[in-house]
Image (cartoon, grey):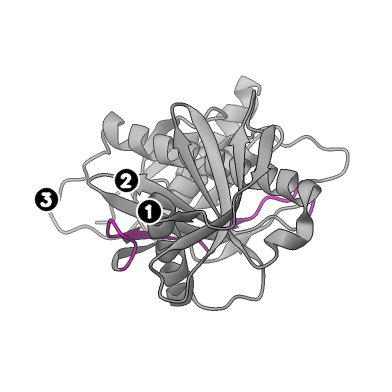
């Protein structure tokens, strides 16, 4: 990206951040996020991206093996020792066991998974059970939608789970952003501890024929930090594209590797 384009985007972003600025009480300090806070968002966004990729390519591998056997089943992914495992199965009626029919293990890359059919009696009473329960409860709370959604469950500390619900991509090279929620669940996936609306409306921008985009841009009025799904949105594009985010007090750039850079500070209203 040329310096001229970057400078132009930064100017637009700064103006946007001023337009969405909110009033502050006299003497109120505006504290910028720490590097650690921004790094934590990057880490969660990267993990969400990897989960999504693992679920996608593992699902393709299972469909190639025996598509009928996984109809109506839920996928749950987990990363251990640097590799992703994705299982496919169902909760029993009592929600006390997760019955696994297939397991897909990452090979050389996130695009390659080896699939094996599991014995009929394989049941999980640990992470996969907790994640499946957490996903079910979060989806019930989220409600029905008029478009397909993806769900991802990631462990967080101390002994809790994050459940993400975010719109699925339905058109080639059109990457939806928004309409997403993150739930914090207890360790065994039976209770919602916190619900975070990350974005409200869904943005879907189709690529312009014959034009190469330099970066994306959106305003974010629900908070003063970029969201995990902002990082996910950047990484999931092919090729990745930077995203500029204007919040009420700050402006940011989410770079193509998922790292987040402060671009400026919004002005206070007097």
What residue lies at 58% left-to-right and 39% top-to-bottom?
234
- The magenta region covers 171-190
The quarter of the image holding the C terminus is bottom left
Secondary structure, mark 1, is strand
The answer for how far apart the CA atoms under marks 2 and 1 are is 7 Å
Q: Mark 2 points at which residue?
A: 156
Q: Which residue is drawn at 57% across and 78% down?
A: 144
Tell me which residue sits at (30%, 59%) in the image.
Answer: 188
Q: Are marks 2 and 1 in contact (CB under 8 Å)?
A: yes
Relative to the observer, which residue lies in front, 261 or 24? 261
Query: Pointer 3: residues within 10 angstroms few (<14), some, or many (20+)?
Result: few
Asked if residue 217 is positioned above or below residue 123 in the image, the reply reads above
State which tag comes first along the sequence, 2 or 1.
Answer: 2
Relative to residue 26, is residue 192 drawn left or right? right
Q: What residue does disc 3 label?
A: 27
In percent of width and height, residue 197 lies at 41, 63
Numbered disc in front, either 3 or 2: 2
Whole-percent x, y for residue 226 in the image: 42, 46
Mark 1, residue position: 162
* Disc 1: CA contacts within 10 A as few (<14), some (14-19) or many (>=20): many
Q: Which residue is drawn at 34% across and 53% down?
A: 161
């Amino acid at each position: 990206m040329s310096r001229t384009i970057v400078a132009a985007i930064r100017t637009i972003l700064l103006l946007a951040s001023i337009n969405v600025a909110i009033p502050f009480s006299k003497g109120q300090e505006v504290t910028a996020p720490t590097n650690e806070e921004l790094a934590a968002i990057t880490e969660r966004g990267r993990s969400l991206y990897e989960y999504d990729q693992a679920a996608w390519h593992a699902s393709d591998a299972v469909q190639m093996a025996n598509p009928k056997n996984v109809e109506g089943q839920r996928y749950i992914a987990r990363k251990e020792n640097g590799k992703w495992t994705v299982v496919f199965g169902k909760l029993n009626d009592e929600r006390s066991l997760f019955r696994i029919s297939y397991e897909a293990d990452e090979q050389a890359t996130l695009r390659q998974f080896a699939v094996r059919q599991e014995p009929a009696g394989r049941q999980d009473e640990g992470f996969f059970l907790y994640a499946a329960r957490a996903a079910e409860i979060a989806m019930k709370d989220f409600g029905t939608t008029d478009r397909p959604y993806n769900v991802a469950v990631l462990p967080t500390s101390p002994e809790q789970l994050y459940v993400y619900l975010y719109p699925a991509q339905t058109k080639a090279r059109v990457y939806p952003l928004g309409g997403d929620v993150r739930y914090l669940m207890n360790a065994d996936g039976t209770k919602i501890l916190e619900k975070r609306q990350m974005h409200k409306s869904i943005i879907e921008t189709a690529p312009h024929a014959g034009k190469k985009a330099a970066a994306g841009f959106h305003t974010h009025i629900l908070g003063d930090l970029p969201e995990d799904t902002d990082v996910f949105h950047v990484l999931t594009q092919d090729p990745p594209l930077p995203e500029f985010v204007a919040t009420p007090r700050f402006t940011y750039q989410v770079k193509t590797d998922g790292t987040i850079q402060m671009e400026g500070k919004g002005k206070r209203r007097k």
